[in-house]
Structure formats: C-alpha cells, structure tokens
Amino acid sequence: VYARSSVALARALLGTLLVRDAREGRTSGIIVETEAYGGPEDAASHARAGRTARTAPMFGPAGHAYVYLVYGLHHCLNAVAERDGIAGAVLIRGAAPVEGLDLMRHRRGRPHDADARLAAGPARLCQAFGIDRDLDGADLTAGRALWLEAGDAGALDPGRVVTGPRVGVGYAGGDWAGRPWRFGLRDHPSLSRPFPDLLPHTPPGT
DNA sequence: CATAGGATTTGCT
DNA sequence: GCAAATCCTATGC
C-alpha cells in the first residue's frame, strides 16, 4: 500500500485514520492534509542532499515513519513511500481529532484551542499525538505505537480533495516550489491553513 | 571546526 | 504583519 510514488501516497492517505498508542492513552484522527516529497532530484525534499544519517528512513522501505526536528523545537511526521532504496515520503500536515481529545489538549498545553485545531499543522499534530524522534524509523504497519487504518476512507468525497503548492519550500529552485504536491480536504477546519483560491493558470512573470 | 538556515508556531506590535 | 524560540544538519574552510 505504501510502496508507490510519494504523490500517489499523499493523495491516498487523505481520509485514513492515524492512531497513536502511548502509555498515557490512545489518540487518533482522520488525516485531512498531506504533502509529497521526492528524492535527491526534488529541491524541496530533505533527500536533496542524498542519503544522510537524518534522512536514512526516507530511503528505506515504505510504510515506516520519518520523524525530524525542525526549527530546533518542532517535530514533523512523514510516512515513507517508494520501494526500498528510493527516497520519498509524505508529510502529515493535519488531522481531525477522533479519540483522545483530552489527552491531545493536555499535551498541547493550550486549553482554549478548538477541537478541530488540536492537530492542525505538522508540528501541532506531532505534539497532540505525542510523536517525537523516538518514533523515527518506526514500522507503521506493525500496529504497535503508531499506525494507520483505512477507516471509512471510502466515505471521503473525492470532490473535496484539493491540491496546491507545498508550504514553506520557497527556497527550492526551478518549478519544485510550485508543484501542486500538497493535498487536502477543501474547507476542512483541521487544515494547517487554507488552500489558495484556485485561479486560472497564469504564466510566470506576469 | 564554524556557521548558516530550516517541510513551524506563537506572541507581540 | 513580524520576529523570536532553539538545535541539529549540512556545508564550507
């Protein structure tokens, strides 16, 4: 299921249930926003520098977690795609909380946040689900600490799926920053941020 | 070995 | 709207 292109996997993960089992309890949520990242050819991907100690999981077998620390204080969760030896991963950017909302709120330490915002954003999601680098490389198909369930993904309305440019990758050259590799459910309250309005395509520089 | 910068979030102006 | 928080990685000398 995971051993396909990161773009295909990013689209497919929408509507699936992300489940975290920890000592403090169980938390889960429906994934509503993802982003695809490629291999060394993708100037916006961590794999752009080739295989390193940090990015090794991206080059490993599909269905494992790639968790990294960003800006020195936030964690982000990816599901590894592509076959073993080929780099590719899907950043999980937002989920609609289903189970363990109290635990999520406690982990977040922000009692007044709306339910839908508890895991809206890649770093908020990791904080709400209690995900850190201890889970880097974890097997998401083993069903132990962290896994994905098909759930009622079939109930997802394909007409609600929208795409757009990936977030925060403006440093990437060429057309990499502009590729519509971000996927989400239109107008969902648990998006990290709105998708840009779909406008008629205009050539660059106009 | 030194240093620049980041797949973010939050709080203040 | 802007900048701080904060640390690890990647790169260059």
Image (cartoon, coloured by chain):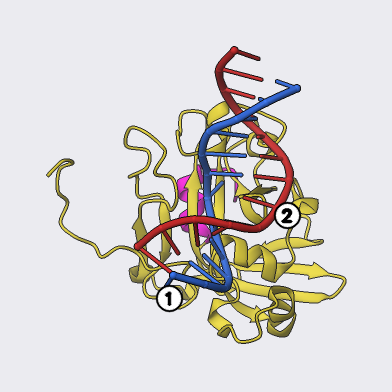
Chain colours: A yellow, B blue, C red
Q: Is residue A70 above or below residue A18?
A: above
Which numbered disc covers residue A26? none
In the picture, measured across the screen, residue A130 lies left or right of residue A125, that is: right
* In-front residue for pair A72/B7: A72
How many numbered badges does the structure rendering display? 2
Which chain is mark 2 on? A
The vertical placement of A147 against A88, above or below, is: below
Name which residue lies at 80% across and 52% down: A134
At 72% from the left and 54% from the top, the residue drawn is A140
The quarter of the picture where residue A152 lies is bottom right
- The three-letter code of the residue at mark 1 reads His
Reply yes or no: does residue A45 show up in magenta: no
**Could you tell me if the residues under marks 1 and 2 are in contact, i.e. CB atoms within 8 Å?**
no
Q: Main secondary structure of the magenta part?
A: helix
Q: Secondary structure at mark 2?
A: loop
Using residue A106 as the reference point, say whether residue B11 is left or right of it.
left
Residue at coordinates 51% horizontally, 45% vertically from top-left?
A6
- Mark 1 → mark 2, Cα distance in angstroms: 27 Å
**Pointer 1 residue:** A188
What is the span of residues highlighted in magenta in the rendered image? A1-13
Q: Is residue A3 magenta?
A: yes
Closest to the observer: A171 or A151?
A: A171
Check the image and report above or below for A66 versus A40: below
Crowdedness near tag 2: few (<14), some (14–19) or many (≥20) residues, C-alpha within 10 Å: some
Q: Quadrant of the C terminus of chain A?
A: top left
**Identity of the residue drawn at 50% across and 74% down:** A190
Query: Which residue does the numbered mark 2 point to in the structure image?
Result: A141
The residue mark sitting in front, 1 or 2, is: 1
Question: In the rendered structure, which amino acid carries the disc numbered 2?
Answer: Thr
Residue A41 x, y percent position in the rendering: 46, 28
Where residue B12 appears, as percent x and y from the top left, is 52, 72
Q: Is residue A160 left or right of residue A151?
A: left
